[in-house]
Image: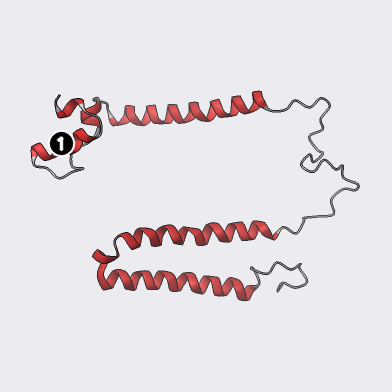
Amino acid sequence: MSATHLSIPCVAVAAAQSGQAFGALPLGDFLFPIAPGAALAIHVALSAGIVAAIVVVAAWLREKRAGARPDVPYESGILPAAPPQGPQNAPYFLIAALFVIFDMEAAILFAWAVAARDAGWLGLAEAAIFIGVLLLALIYLWVDGALDWGGPRQRKK
């Protein structure tokens, strides 16, 4: 069996036979020929189809409630005694946003750690500056009171 009839390993075999570096040969040339625009169209169509299927199945499987009012909260099952008096204090949204922001630095630092040996002292200096900026942002948020779980009377205005 030739290298063109294999799946993923054929790229390495064909690259080794041709003397090119691994990854220099496009994978699509070995599986089946397709234009880049057609590949993009197929990807978009499949993605949209999967999203549409998930929405349809979720609507089909959801619980049908006879006489349900869309303006009444259903999460707790307790009917509201009075209309809401304004926005509710929900600091967990702020904590979630801070988590997303500071979690991205972990992904970036993992990528840096893989290339740390090749990056040398310049890479170390760049990572130190990056961590320093994040540390300054965290200190600013701490001083500003963004990390306080207390009510509005305890936070700085």
Which quadrant is home to the C terminus?
bottom right
Residue 43 shown left or right of residue 75 in the figure: left
Image location (x, y in percent) of residue 104: 47, 58
The answer to which image quadrant residue 70 occupies is top right
Residue at 28% x, 71% y is: 122
Image location (x, y in percent) of residue 81: 91, 47
10 Å neighbourhood of mark 1: few (<14), some, or many (≥20)? some
Image location (x, y in percent) of residue 102: 51, 62
Q: Nearer the viewer, residue 13 or 147?
A: 13
Residue at 25% x, 31% y is: 28
Task: Establish if 59 lies above or below 90.
Answer: above
Name the residue tied to disc 1: 13
Residue 106 shown left or right of residue 69 in the figure: left
Residue at 69% x, 28% y is: 62
Image location (x, y in percent) of residue 10: 19, 33
Residue lying farthest right? 81
Residue 87 shown left or right of residue 92 in the figure: right
Amino acid marked by disc 1: Val
